[in-house]
């Protein structure tokens, strides 16, 4: 059963933000000696402690799934008397410690039975750690909380043949051989850090390395991967160098260590981890080669390498006081990685092309936010970006904390300007370098650096839910005035529903607005529940372009006429709102009449001219013609009526077929004109051309079925090959391609993940149940890592609505079985899957009852982890 231990109902605790108290001791230094063995690792800890106040107070350390072997004070050889301390399942308490001293504690843990991938675990022939949020306590007794910063020295001992590479944070101090084939390596990290940023890696890894010079100092950059993956590491290295340059140029932030290491593992719950100087990554976000990685994968590698690197300042040099402040580091770092990616896409382009490239990135980010974060914010897990309570912190690495958190950071920039934002950042580091602080400290730095009043802005940290801004307009032709009325509202959601008499005060909302047909383009700062603004000298009724570039993470309600949407789609100079107008046209047709979504001739004319408008980049046109996702449409439907997923899916399909049919000539012509003329290279422009061409492929494939097989065979890159494979099998064509693909890429785990996904997410597989069973029994699915689980189980449950929502409930029963099976090994991954059904109340019958049944089955299961219990409990709540 691994390290995933069952939880009693009695031991479930809710952690409250309001309970925060500082740790009563300083821990100036932490010295660790790891004797690394997969079956039994021994960890020796020397913990220096100094009481902060006069009053004696027990010293309480966290520790889980570890065995205490020895404990003494001040390096005495005789162990402490057992009456002087107490050990429980989760703590070690020293009842009467002296005011200061050195604790010497030896513990053991068993990495090869740790299937939770938190703490020290085996991955292939290697050993690695994951400490955020609370994994350090699975190796040693320690104040495992982000506000205890300590300076670490780490000695690693291991068999040299089995573990030739031994890494930890900071700088390499010493390497020496030991008798009996062992070796020992010492690392010292000069920067005090919380335990969640600690890391150890031991293994047989190959290394790509380069040196750079920054401010006259040489820095060593290393990317460690499995030896056979070395040819796929260069792009991660290039992304790291670009990130280092960008942070210096944009924020004046240098790389502060002599060396910076990235290590890739195929067993990882999340994307990557920002351990100080030793980032550990899911292989998915390190390995990139044209033959095995798609454009989206390349983009992901660049973004995640950037994200983890940027954490070095926003997260590591300045960290969080407690886990409720998680968005302090995550929202800010996502904002920074978004800006980095946007600048990378724009690099080297003409000013117009650069603006358009930035818009493409913005649209991608907002589409994801509006699909997944808005949904979260309307469901049982809704929480403010700074939550007030949690049962399991691992459940709060959410779209809200990350993506809405980034939008809140972006609003500072919108309100204060690029330079004002930079002044705020400079002051933040000046004040707080080396500290563990709060979201309020960040807001105070932004306000003080700009003499701005951001008091009301603080409500963004307090309220859950997506605010709605309802906009109405009045045009007075005689007076030549145009008035916009704004009404903001944000009714209680999620846990807020339990608070009696909760009044959510108005937010400070920066709304960029233009009036098409005039030269008005302005930033309006909404601060009250209802307010109006009147524009003078308006001679003809304009079309308002609201919340341009998505200046605030709100939902805008304005009753656009079809003509106004067409005007926005044809003429809005804000590329985001132009895209949004086209999306609204699609959504309206699909949602308004789920029986027969129809587009008018005029609308097809609009579509045709957009699709063939060469002044619009191919990347942008691909976004314009990507229909709103099923989940986004589901939210729109469920605002008005209980959701029938089958009906919605069919309506979306019909809309897609209408686009195929009515624009067939255009699709076919695009497909040929966009034929690649040069060998594959990853860059935004070429990726955009491939995206549009592969969208065209989907629209022409029923009329011209040979195109897919031809493209599949001719492809010199994974983007085109997987697009052809997916299109072909979704059209019900040719098992042979699937087999060919498997045989070609059998040894490439990340590519085989794509093979599983293509099948599990196939909406047109009439025998999906049999397919799933076959895939579950496939040898490549034995002992699946989290990536493999995501490629099959999550792909089916989250990306195959037509089959997941089978009317007999078989999809939901599959979900329940999988949640429980995964939970026995890896609660973090199980609780992600558990979230799939949290919207159950928005569904029509019979779906709703069948979903509730499945949730109840999971909730009643014995030995449920705290992770899954919190999610399912809140869903049923
Ligand atoms: N801080 C990392 C994400 C991360 C969070 C938790 C983890 O284990 C529970 C692992 C990684 C980031 O934002 O990239
Ligand atoms: Zn992060």
Image (spheres, rainbow, N blue to C red):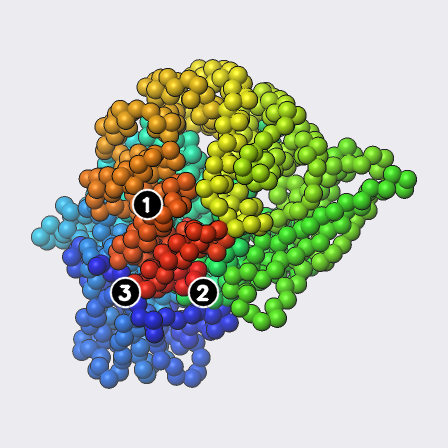
Question: Looking at the image, which is closer to me, 90 or 51?
Answer: 90
Q: Distance between the residues labelled 1 and 2?
A: 25 Å
Provide residue 611's location: percent of width, then percent of height.
57, 23
Q: Distance between the residues labelled 3 and 2?
A: 19 Å
Question: Which quadrant of the view contains residue 564?
Answer: top right
Q: Mark 2 points at which residue?
A: 877
Mark identifier at residue 793: 1
Identify the residue at image location x=28%, y=37%: 771
- 841 is higher (above) or lower (below) than 108: above
Q: What element carries label 1?
A: helix
Q: Disc 1 or 2, which lies upstream in sequence?
A: 1
Q: Disc 1 or 3, which lies upstream in sequence?
A: 1
Proximity of marks 1 and 3: CB atoms separated by less than 8 Å: no
Provide residue 446's location: percent of width, then percent of height.
62, 55
Provide residue 590's location: percent of width, then percent of height.
56, 37
Question: Looking at the image, which is closer to me, 677 or 53?
Answer: 677
The answer, for residue 842, to whether it is visible in the render is yes
Identify the residue at image location x=27%, y=46%: 785
Question: Looking at the image, which is closer to me, 269 or 724?
Answer: 724
Question: Looking at the image, which is closer to me, 785 or 773?
Answer: 773
Left or right: where 3 falls relative to 330: left
Q: Hey, which residue is sitting farthest right in the picture? A: 478
Question: Which quadrant of the view contains residue 585?
Answer: top right
| Figure disc tally | 3
Identify the residue at image location x=62%, y=48%: 555
Proximity of marks 3 and 2: CB atoms separated by less than 8 Å: no
């Amino acid at each position: 059963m691994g390290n995933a231990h069952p939880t009693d109902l009695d031991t479930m605790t809710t952690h409250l933000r309001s309970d925060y108290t500082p740790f009563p001791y300083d821990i100036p230094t932490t010295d660790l000696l790891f004797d690394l063995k997969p079956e039994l690792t021994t960890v020796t800890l020397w913990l220096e402690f100094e009481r902060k106040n006069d009053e004696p107070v027990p010293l309480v350390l966290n520790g889980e799934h570890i065995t205490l072997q020895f404990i003494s004070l001040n390096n005495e050889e005789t162990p402490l008397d057992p009456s002087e301390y107490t050990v429980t399942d989760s703590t070690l308490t020293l009842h009467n410690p002296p005011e200061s001293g050195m604790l010497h504690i030896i513990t053991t843990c068993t990495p090869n039975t740790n299937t939770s991938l938190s703490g020290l675990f085996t991955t292939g022939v290697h050993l690695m750690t994951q400490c955020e949020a609370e994994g350090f306590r699975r190796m040693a007794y320690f104040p495992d909380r982000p506000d205890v910063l300590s300076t670490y020295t780490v000695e690693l001992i291991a068999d040299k043949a089995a573990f030739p590479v031994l890494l930890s944070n900071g700088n390499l101090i010493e390497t020496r051989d030991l008798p009996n084939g062992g070796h020992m390596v010492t690392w010292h990290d000069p920067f005090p850090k919380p335990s969640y940023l600690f890391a150890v890696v031991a293994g047989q890894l190959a290394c790509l390395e380069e040196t750079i010079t920054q401010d006259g100092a040489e820095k060593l950059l290393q990317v460690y991967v499995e030896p056979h993956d070395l040819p796929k590491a260069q792009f991660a290295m290039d992304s790291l160098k670009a990130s280092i340059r960008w942070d210096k140029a944009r924020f004046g932030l240098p790389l502060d260590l002599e060396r910076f290491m990235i290590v890739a593992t195929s067993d990882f719950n999340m994307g990557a981890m920002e351990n100080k100087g030793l980032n550990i990554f899911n292989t998915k976000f390190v390995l990139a080669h044209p033959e095995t990685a798609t454009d989206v994968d390349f983009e992901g590698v660049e973004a995640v390498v950037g994200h983890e690197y940027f954490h070095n300042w926003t997260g590591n040099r300045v960290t969080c006081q407690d886990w409720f402040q998680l968005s302090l580091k995550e929202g800010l770092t996502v904002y920074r990685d978004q800006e980095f990616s946007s600048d990378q896409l724009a690099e080297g382009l003409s000013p117009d092309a650069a603006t358009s490239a930035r818009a493409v990135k913005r649209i991608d980010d907002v589409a994801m936010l509006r699909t997944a974060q808005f949904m979260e914010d309307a469901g049982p897990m809704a929480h403010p970006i700074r939550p007030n309570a949690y049962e399991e912190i691992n459940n709060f690495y959410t779209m809200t904390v990350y993506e809405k958190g980034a939008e809140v950071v972006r609003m500072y920039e919108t309100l204060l300007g690029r330079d004002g934002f930079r002044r705020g950042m400079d002051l933040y580091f000046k004040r707080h370098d080396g500290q563990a602080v709060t979201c309020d400290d960040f807001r105070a730095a932004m306000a003080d650096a700009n003499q701005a009043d951001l008091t009301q802005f603080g409500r963004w940290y307090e309220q859950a839910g997506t605010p709605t801004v309802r906009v109405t307009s009045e045009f007075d032709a005689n007076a030549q005035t145009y008035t916009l009325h704004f009404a903001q509202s944000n009714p209680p959601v999620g846990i807020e529903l339990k608070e009696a008499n909760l009044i959510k005060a108005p937010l400070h909302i920066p709304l960029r607005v233009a009036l098409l047909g005039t030269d008005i383009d302005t930033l309006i700062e909404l601060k009250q529940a209802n307010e109006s603004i009147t524009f003078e000298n308006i001679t003809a009724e304009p079309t308002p372009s609201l919340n341009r570039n998505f200046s605030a993470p709100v939902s805008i309600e304005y009753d656009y006429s079809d003509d106004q949407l067409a005007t926005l789609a044809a003429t809005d100079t804000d590329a985001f709102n132009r895209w949004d107008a086209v999306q609204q046209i699609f959504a309206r047709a699909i949602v308004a009449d789920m029986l027969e979504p129809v587009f008018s001739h005029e609308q097809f004319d609009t579509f045709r001219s957009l699709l063939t408008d060469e002044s619009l980049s191919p990347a942008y046109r691909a976004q314009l013609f990507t229909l709103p996702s099923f989940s986004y449409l589901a939210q729109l439907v469920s605002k008005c009526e209980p959701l029938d997923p089958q009906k919605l899916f069919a309506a979306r399909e019909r809309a897609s077929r209408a686009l195929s049919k009515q624009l067939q000539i255009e699709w076919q012509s695009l497909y040929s004109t966009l034929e690649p003329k040069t060998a594959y290279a990853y860059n935004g422009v070429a990726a955009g051309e491939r995206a549009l061409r592969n969208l065209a492929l989907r629209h022409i494939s029923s009329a011209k079925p040979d195109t897919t097989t031809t493209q599949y065979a001719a492809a010199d890159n994974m983007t085109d090959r997987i697009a052809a494979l997916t299109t072909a099998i979704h059209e019900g064509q040719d098992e042979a391609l699937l087999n060919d693909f498997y045989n070609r890429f059998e040894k490439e785990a990340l590519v085989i993940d794509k093979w599983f996904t293509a099948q599990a997410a196939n909406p047109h597989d009439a025998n999906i149940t049999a397919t799933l069973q076959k895939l579950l029994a496939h040898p490549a699915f034995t002992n699946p890592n989290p990536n493999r689980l995501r490629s099959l189980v999550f792909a089916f449950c989250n990306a195959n609505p037509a089959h997941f929502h089978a009317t007999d409930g078989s999809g939901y029963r599959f979900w329940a079985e999988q949640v429980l099976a995964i939970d026995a090994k890896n609660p973090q991954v199980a609780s992600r899957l558990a979230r799939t059904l949290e919207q159950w109340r928005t569904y029509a019958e019979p779906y709703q009852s069948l979903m509730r049944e499945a949730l109840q089955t999971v909730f009643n299961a014995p030995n449920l982890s705290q992770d899954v219990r919190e999610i399912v409990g809140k869903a049923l709540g």
